[in-house]
Image: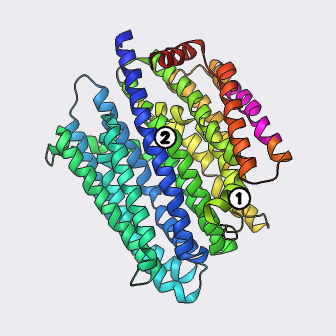
Amino acid sequence: MTDNKGISENSRRIARNTVLLYFRMFLLMAVGLFTSRVILHALGETELGIYSAVGGAVALFGVLTGSMSSAISRFITYEMGLKESDLGKVFSSAVCIQIILSAVVVLLAEPLCLWWISHKMVLPPERISAARWVLQFSLLSFVIQLISIPYNADIIAHERMDAFAWISIFEACGQLAVALAIKYSPIDRLIFYSAMLAMVSLLVRIAYGMFCKRHFAEANAGWQPDRKLFGKMFSFAGWNFIGSGSGVLRDYGGNILLNAFFGPVANAAWYYASKINGAVQKFIASFTTAINPQITKSWAAGERDYMMRLIFRGSRMSIWLMMLVTLPLLFNTSFLTEIWLGKGLVPEGTVVFIQLILVYIMIEAVSYTMVTAMLSTGDIRDYQILVGGLQLLNLPVDWILLKAGAPAYIIFIVASAVALLCLAARLFMLRKMIGLPVGRFLRDVLLREILVVGLAATVPFLLSRHMEPGWGAFLVSLAATEIWSAGVIWLLGLEHDEKDILINKIIKR
């Protein structure tokens, strides 16, 4: 069992890594949002919608790869939590599997996506050729990122968040440089943008590989894939396929439905909603990425009590951090979107899409540490059949409602409703899988989160009803929301020991 000294060291490591990842997140958020604005001005909403729709079609093949990516992360981290491990075989097997999956993706995606572009996609006829080139470069980027996953997972499992942060920043700066270079392109701008993003993906893959080979022995272990390990990974991935696949279908399948029912402009609105989603997800991932390896390692080491503490605290802290970001955005979306993209340039539907996706993110954030705990066990069949099966409801329900004449934003409402069902299912399954005390979780985590978020939202809601949009109203709303939210979190959201830790940190500083 981990003694108090070991737990203290783990806590310091989590705190140190969280600080590094928040530095990464703030820089990535600023660069990413500015890059999105530059791209809109350089390409226009129709061209951007084409890129979003084609990229979404390629991303659908994440149904095949996402489950294996989770398996790789879980097996590498779990192996490190054991007293005796053979990381070299795990890492080599992971790289081999990703190469095989890359070949499968290319063989399937190439003909299917070309057929969809030529016969089903809604776009101007003169842009079909450009869309086909976008497909090729999007597919190349996807494959490069796929092969990078074992290296990325190895860095996170070793908790080297400094490298993870700096390589991510390099990637974001590369994407910004590409966006700024679009207007100087000697060829079709959309094709140029797709090709240069593929180049950035390749450079990032090289950076991950060089770092791992320099710092981790398993990355230099040579070619030693293990057939038994293949079987274990594919068995784990096979069941996880239901959950990860349903998530991909929910997100990118919804984007394809938007193209079919509303055309490229709706895809452009979805693109910007997804950018906000990505930025906010990076914010919370800065915390969960630091805590997730500890959850998996504590399960591997048999430290159940410590793991439960991490699950409870991680869920609550995820919501508090998410709330501080989403509430100012939620009640000032229209003003901020015009500042971000430019007045008169915001694609129709973008504001509502962003507001609804923020609500969805808040619901999902409750479960982040629970999902990590579930994956840590390795015994995920029943969980994925139930929770993954529920997530599969998104796409058919979206299609039925859109066919009946529902507005485009219905896909986000459906996603939030299904997320609530999945939360209930996770609690039910984790009680059986790891002995999660559901009653205590509902009392100490979920009800507390609902109370704190509800109280914190009152101030920005009232201000939004009584102030005209503008910089003055936004700054007043931002300051009042952050101060009020911090006070509510302090009074109702933190445990006594968490308050003591925070006070001691402040005094020490």
Q: For this rendering, which residue is in front, 97 or 367?
A: 367
Provide the major secondary structure of the magenta segment. Answer: helix
Left or right: residue 401 versus residue 80 is right
Q: Note whether 484 is above or below 411 in the view shown.
A: above
Viewer can see residue 397 = no
User: How far apart are the two marked residues, 2 and 1, measured between alpha carbons?
Assistant: 24 Å
Magenta span includes 453: yes
Type of amino acid at the residue the image marks with label 1: Val
Q: Residue 436, labelled with which disc?
A: none
Give the image location of residue 371, x and y in percent. Answer: 51, 36
Q: For this rendering, which residue is in front, 309 or 163?
A: 163
Q: For this rendering, which residue is in front, 392 or 355?
A: 355
Q: Return the residue at label 1.
A: 351
In magenta, the rendered stretch is 446-462
Q: Return the residue at label 2.
A: 285
Quadrant containing the N terminus is: top left
Give the image location of residue 152, x and y in percent. Answer: 33, 46
Q: Note whether 447 is above or below 55 in the view shown.
A: above
Give the image location of residue 165, x and y in percent. Answer: 37, 44
Give the image location of residue 509, x and y in percent. Answer: 45, 20
Quarter of the rendering containing residue 83: top left
As drawn, the residue found furthest toward the right would be 466
As drawn, the residue found furthest toward the front would be 472
Q: How many marks?
A: 2
Left or right: residue 105 versus residue 34 is left
Q: For this rendering, which residue is in front, 312 or 97?
A: 312
Q: Note whether 446 is above or below 62 in the view shown.
A: above
